[in-house]
Each structure stands twice: as structure tokens, then as C-alpha cells.
Image: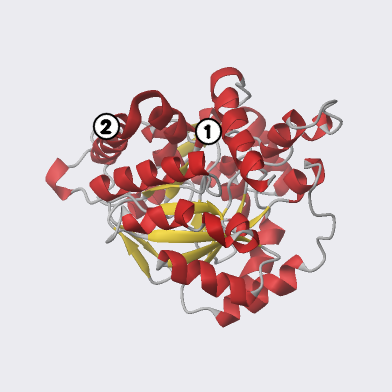
Amino acid sequence: MSAQRKDDHVRLAIEQQHTHRGVNQFDEVSFVHHALAGIDRPQVSLGTSFAGVTWPVPVYINAMTGGSEKTGVINRDLATAAAETGVPIASGSMNAYFKDPSCAHTFQVLREHNPDGFVIANVNATASVENVWRALELLRANALQIHINTAQETAMPEGDRSFGSWAPQIEKIAAAVDVPVIVKEVGNGLSRQTVAQLKDLGVAAADVSGRGGTDFARIENGRRELGEYAFLNGWGQSAAACLLDAGGTGLPLLASGGVRHPLDVARALALGARAVGSSGGFLRTLLDGGVPALVAQLQTWLDQLAALQTMLGAATPADLTGCDVLIEGSLREFCADRGIDTRALAQRSTKTTTGSTR
């Protein structure tokens, strides 16, 4: 049943890529164009760091799948593309492995085909410390990703209905492991209050994983004959909204959810993300064109991101947080309701020490 559910998730996620197009609030973020801001391309670096982690690029392949023979092939190919491009990669939820150790190879291929890369093991918030260590050892993982997904679990026919233990267990796991712990949503976003709470729980970083990409509540409704929880489709906040909301918490932020192209990556970095992940779009490319197509897409994204940094005058991804950005539409309304000063974002390049602008 677990293997079938994993295959269903992939099938329904791909269907969303082809058919579902909701509002994407990254389109409500734009850069103020300063025509003489550009720098020379050799000055640009794509390196980023957070919580003691250093990556050569600020783009990663986010959690997708594993647990069945079909998804094992997908993980093998994802790992091959990650190895060829130097892009970090996260596994899908390894709960299937905890329930059935015979599917271990469907996750282990992430390390076998990417022996020197940065690999992140993914578990749920109910995983025991013992199982977390099993996951880390199986992948020889460089970091741990704990996913939280109350909306998905609520829509899932066989989903969890007991959420009160999640925060204490996250704290327990974070204290027990010796790799950085990243907590991520699965497409409904992390609010300012949640990110502040995660910081208190001792995690190293938070992936806001907002609304706009793969909608797992919609996927779980697709597994129901009557779709009884369709009212949860589109639940939550976008990645752009979450980055703006949680920027002052002091916890390093990663971003995913609705990331379609390198401009969205640059937008997320400008709003404070240390790195930006994608899942559904990369999966669609892989299934449509194989490993060569995904490698080409990743390389293109990195080249175009460097080009954007060159034009914007940002020598590093972190420097994008000094670029002026305009917030429009429903995202601006969200900021107003949450007490976020959008005017300051539009005037960040003003150098207060000299009174000059970029």
C-alpha cells in the first residue's frame, strides 16, 4: 500500500504540473532596475552558506520520492543529475523505509549515484531518534530534513490526526543528531510564529516551502473517490509571503514552493532565502527528457542566475538582499496585514553612510 501511494503521489504531482496553474506570488515581486548597477561576470560567485553548511550553488533538488521500484529509478536519475551539476539533493520521506526495510535501495541510490554530493535525508516529525539515525546512516547524509504537513495529513485517507507531539519530537531529534536539522513544510508555508518556534526547538534552518508548487492536499484529494477535502486545496501562504513574514526571526531560511525559473530563485534570494529548492518542475523535466534534460536544465538555471546577479550587481547570492524590490498586489496586502514595511524593501540600495544610491 505504501509503495502504491508513492507511485500515486508521483502520478498526481505530474498531473498538477501539466494542468494546475494557480496564482504565483513570486510574480508580485520585481526588482527596481538600476541601469549602472551591473558588475563583471568574473566577480560573481554562486556559493552560499547557512548553519555551518557551505554549498557551491544556492539551488537544490528538494524532497520528492522513494519507497517503490518506480520511485527508486527516479531517485537514481535525480542523484545522477545532482552529481553532474554539484546541486544538493534531498530524499523523499523515508517513512516507507522504516516500515519496510526491503525498499532501502530506493533511497540508497541517492548516495550510490552521488557519492561526493550533499545529500539530505528526509523524515516526518513522528520519527523516532533511532529511525532518524537509520536514515542518516543509510544515505551517509550531510543533513536532516524533517517535514511537517498537517494539511496533507488531514486530507490523506490514512493520514495522521495527532499533531501535538510534533514540536517536542522535533526538539528531541534536533538535540540527538550531529548534522544540521532543517524543518520544511510540504507546500503550505511556515509563518513567522512557526519559524520562531522552530528556532526555540533548536533546528538549524527552516525551508518555508510555500503554496504555489505541488499541492499535496490536492494530491491526497485525488486519492479520494469523492475528494471530500477539496476545500484544503491551495491552503496556506506562498514562499514569497513566508520569506517576508519570517525574515526577522534570526533562523536561516530556505525557500521552495512555486519556483519556476531562475528569476524566481533570484526573487527568493532577494527576500532572504539562503538557497532555493524545486521539486515538481525538475521531476517533470526528468520524466519528459531523462537525465540529460535535467542536467541541462540545472546548468541553465545556474548560468542564468549568475547572469541575473551580474546585471543586478550582486557578487554573491547573499548580496541580492541589498537589491531594491517592489512588492505588489495580494502580496503587498499580506505585508500590510502582517506589519511588514514594503517601502524599506524598495529602498535597500540607499547607502545610509554616504547618502548615495547604487
Q: Position of residue 50 (x, y in %)?
A: 41, 65
Q: Nearer the viewer, residue 219 or 72?
A: 72
In the rendering, which numbered label is found on residue 302? none
Q: How many marks?
A: 2
Assign the C terminus to one quadrant of the image: top left
Residue displayed at 53% across by 45% down = 65
Q: Nearer the viewer, residue 51 or 92?
A: 92
Q: Is residue 213 left or right of residue 170?
A: left
Instruction: Tell me, yes or no, if residue 112 can be seen here.
Output: yes
Q: Residues within 10 Å of mark 2 (few under 14, many from 20)?
A: some
User: Which of the 4 image quarters holds residue 68?
Assistant: top right
Q: Residue beneath label 1, please? A: 26
In space, the residues marked 2 and 1 are separated at their CA atoms by: 28 Å
Lower position in the chain sequence, tag 2 or tag 1: 1
Above or below, comparing residue 76 to residue 144 in the picture: above
Q: Position of residue 278 (x, y in %)?
A: 47, 41
Q: Position of residue 274 (x, y in %)?
A: 42, 55
Residue displayed at 59% across by 81% down = 175
Q: Position of residue 155 (x, y in %)?
A: 80, 40
Residue displayed at 36% across by 58% down = 111
**Amino acid type assigned to the residue bearing label 1 in the image:** Phe
Q: Residue beneath label 2, please? A: 292
Q: Secondary structure at mark 2?
A: helix
Above or below, comparing residue 168 to residue 255 in the picture: below
Which callout, 2 or 1, points to the residue nearer the camera? 2
Name, please, the residue furthest toward the front. 102
Assign the N terminus to one quadrant of the image: top right
**Amino acid type assigned to the residue bearing label 2 in the image:** Pro
User: Which of the 4 image quarters holds residue 157?
Assistant: top right
Q: Is residue 23 left or right of residue 303?
A: right
